[in-house]
Amino acid sequence: NGVRTALRTLGYDNDTMTPHGFRATARTLLDEVLGYRVDWIEHQLAHAVKDANGRAYNRTSHLKDRAEMMQGWADYLDNLKAQAKAGNVIIAKFGQ
């Protein structure tokens, strides 16, 4: 897995960060912070449709919408990075 290898190369161990952790974080923030539709997010994460009828009949892909969503995600991450560089971030170590 390329993402896992990159994380280990950057010094993150499996207890600190996993590829699934990135996916879970993205799933949560795309929904709760950025307000994107859950069905677009689930498609982007390649999650299966939960009900049998949906799997049988739903052939949507929402490619244009998902492309816009991923640009919004990239813009959000760029903004976080810019805030960190500007010193607008408080670093805390909770639970230690």
Image (cartoon, helix red, strand yellow):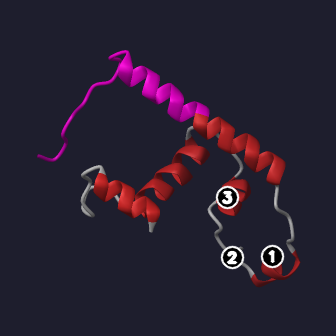
Tags 2 and 1 touching, CB below 8 Å: yes
Tags 2 and 3 touching, CB below 8 Å: no
Q: Earlier in the sequence, mark 3 or mark 1?
A: 3
Mark 2–mark 3 distance (CA, rounded to whole Å): 15 Å
From the image, tell me which residue sits under label 1: 54
Q: Is residue 56 left or right of residue 88?
A: right
Could you tell me the amino acid type at mark 1?
Gly
Q: Most extreme residue toward the top, as rendered?
A: 86
Mark 2–mark 1 distance (CA, rounded to whole Å): 7 Å
**Chain part drawn in magenta:** 75-96
Task: Say what secondary structure mark 2 lies in.
Answer: loop
Q: Is residue 72 above or below residue 4?
A: above
Tags 3 and 1 touching, CB below 8 Å: no
Q: Is residue 40 above or below residue 85?
A: below
Q: In which quadrant of the rendered view does residue 57 lie?
A: bottom right
Could you tell me the amino acid type at mark 2?
Lys
Mark 3–mark 1 distance (CA, rounded to whole Å): 16 Å
Q: Nearer the viewer, mark 2 or mark 3?
A: 3
From the image, tell me which residue sits under label 2: 50
* Residue in the picture at 55% in, 53% down: 27
Could you tell me the amino acid type at mark 3?
Gln
Residue 44's disc is: 3
Badge 1, how many Cα within 10 Å: few under 14, some, many 20+?
A: few
Task: Say what secondary structure mark 3 lies in.
Answer: helix
Find out whether residue 43 is within the magenta segment.
Answer: no
Q: In which quadrant of the rendered view does residue 50 lie?
A: bottom right
